[in-house]
Image (cartoon, helix red, strand yellow):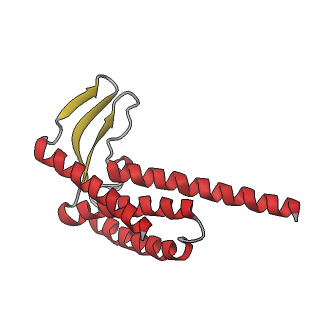
Amino acid sequence: MLYYMIALVVFLIDQGTKWLIVKSMNIGESIPIWEGVFNLTSHRNRGAAFGILQNRRVFFIVITIVIIIGIIWYMRKIMQESKLLALALALILGGAVGNFYDRLLTGEVVDFFDFTLIHYPIFNVADSAIVIGVGLFILDVIRDMIGQRQERMNG
């Protein structure tokens, strides 16, 4: 249950921050937070990461439903076995549902974190949770590979 609560918190923070941006900023408006480094910029994305696959709403909705079902199924299987993997999946789930909700309601995702120093694409809380979740997932896979290698060497 804890991991579903984590996913819910990610979703609520994501939707809350997006709501604040939509209600308080015009699309394209930018507020410097750290001059030349980081802005809050109201942006909409009808595609995926880095703006690829623009205007493929039905595709993203179908794919996200499959991914959400897969994550929930897998979380139920591994929740007791690997806390790190369950946390990773909870973060990915919360982020996926956050962006899914946007696409379902409006056909576009609200983005606003704008790191101008490195010219990184504008993103949101859901995207951040997904990236952190994928990083933890990779860390868990590496940890398991090292553990299996040590078992083979010792056994």
Tell me if 153 is positioned left or right of 91 in this view: right
Closest to the observer, 3 or 136? 3
Look at the image and tell me in which quarter the N terminus lies: bottom left
Is 19 rendered above or below residue 4?
above
Q: Quadrant of residue 145?
A: bottom right
Closest to the observer, 59 or 112? 112
Look at the image and tell me in which quarter the C terminus lies: bottom right
Q: Position of residue 7 (x, y in %)?
A: 37, 62
Q: Position of residue 50 (x, y in %)?
A: 37, 46
Tell me if 26 is positioned left or right of 99 in this view: left
Q: Is residue 99 visible?
A: no
Tell me if 140 is positioned left or right of 103 in this view: right
Is 145 rendered above or below residue 50?
below
Residue located 87% across and 61% down the image: 154
Q: Quadrant of residue 48?
A: bottom left
Residue located 30% across and 64% down the image: 100
Residue located 47% across and 50% down the image: 132
Is 39 rendered above or below residue 65?
above
Q: Quadrant of residue 53?
A: bottom left
